[in-house]
Amino acid sequence: MTTRLLAKLEDFRLLPFFVVASMAIGIGIGKALSISDFALTPPIDAIKAIVGGTFVLTVPNAISLGVPIGLFAMMYPAMTNVHLGEVGDAFRSPRQLGVVLLFNYFVAPFVMLGLANLFVSDPELRTGLILYGLAPCIAMVIIFTFLAKGNTPMALVFVALNSVAQMLLIPVYARLLIGNVSFDIWVVAESVVLYLGLPLVLGVLTRLAVTRRSGEAAMERLKPGLNALSILGLLFTLIVMFSLKGDLIVERPSIVLEMAVPMTLFFAIMFFAVLFIGSRLRFPYRDAVAVAFNSTGRDFEIAIAIAITAFSPTVALATVVGPLIEVPVMLALVWAAMRLSGRWFAEPVAEVVAGEVLPAG
């Protein structure tokens, strides 16, 4: 019975239904509780309050912990797949790294700027969208790479390098594309530790403990449960994120629609352009997927944190709406990448369907 349930969670044909159900549940919760009326506590501040013994259990505080809990449940299983030797190999992939750096820092911010100017009329919503495009993702691209059967250790290396680069470059790009912006750069560093460092350390320690005690076979036996945990973490994160603005989505859907067009175009343009370039450069499929997702995903945690501390509520609203659009679109890109593997790459990726391994394409 348990095995059957785990297989259903991993069945990619059923995942869209689970995603839609999670989004609907989140919207329903947000509408019922009018969560948008609360002044939500930033997740890092809530965790600091727990560590310091000053945490007060209120609805805003409880909800603020939902995103880091969900992201940890997503990220930790992927990190248990990281072989330290493969991480070393990823560092020796200069062409792949060059594509990631080129698109993240010389293409993506300006593509988002152009789309924001073209499609968004409200100046503050436009500022929020531009802010959303500044920083490459440091967390969720790893799970999207993992779901698409990509090179997770390579994705991890790129994320680690991006996490350092964006601490230096976000203030520069914010000043260049938005204007005079003042925010605490430690917000970026704290987010790196919370969303990347913690699941990475625990994931690597789990692999070392299991393999040293019982061998690689024991780790393989844990994979179905870990994969299911990752999917559950994704669905839980969707519920939390959509609940944050559930009442707003129902009452003012035009805001979501106005943001959805440029954001969907951004993710599609970036992902397919980089994936195609990877295929022309003869990257293996696994590497090309890691490169494409690392060049496409945006760091919504950082964007939201900066918007809350340095901008108006409307700008912050634009950054909060961002992941509501990004996550479903990126899941669609996972499916698209696996379907294209047999056409653009020499080796079609194996796709797990209803417990059987079938060739994709």
Image (tube, rainbow, N blue to C red):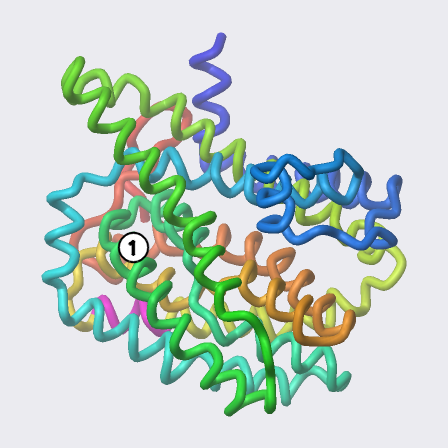
User: Where is residue 230 shown, x and y percent of the image?
Assistant: 45, 34
Q: Residue furthest top?
A: 1
Query: How many residues crowd around disc 1 within 10 Å: few (fewer than 14), some, or many (20 or more)?
Result: many
**Splitting the image into 4 quarters, where does residue 180 fall?**
bottom right
Q: Front-most of 3 and 298?
A: 298
- Residue 104 in the figure: left or right of residue 186: left
Position of 319 relative to 157 (above/below)? below
* Residue corresponding to mark 1: 155
Where is residue 270, by image quadrant?
bottom left
- The amino acid on which the numbered mark 1 sits, given as a three-letter code, is Ala
x%, y% of residue 291?
A: 29, 63
Q: Is residue 144 magenta?
A: no
Q: Is residue 70 left or right of residue 257?
A: left
Q: Which residues are magenta?
A: 273-279
Residue 100 drawn at (x, y percent): 29, 71
Magenta span includes 274? yes
Placement of 247 over or under 112, stated as above or below: above
Magenta stretch: dominant secondary structure = helix
Identify which residue is drawn at 64% across, 56% down.
Answer: 324
Q: Residue at 29% x, 27% y: name it.
A: 206
Residue at point 24% right, 22% down?
A: 219
Can residue 335 be spotted in the picture? Answer: no
Instruction: Say which residue appears at 71% left-offset and 48% top-offset.
Output: 242
Label 1: state its secondary structure.
helix
Give coordinates of residue 292: x percent, y percent: 34, 64
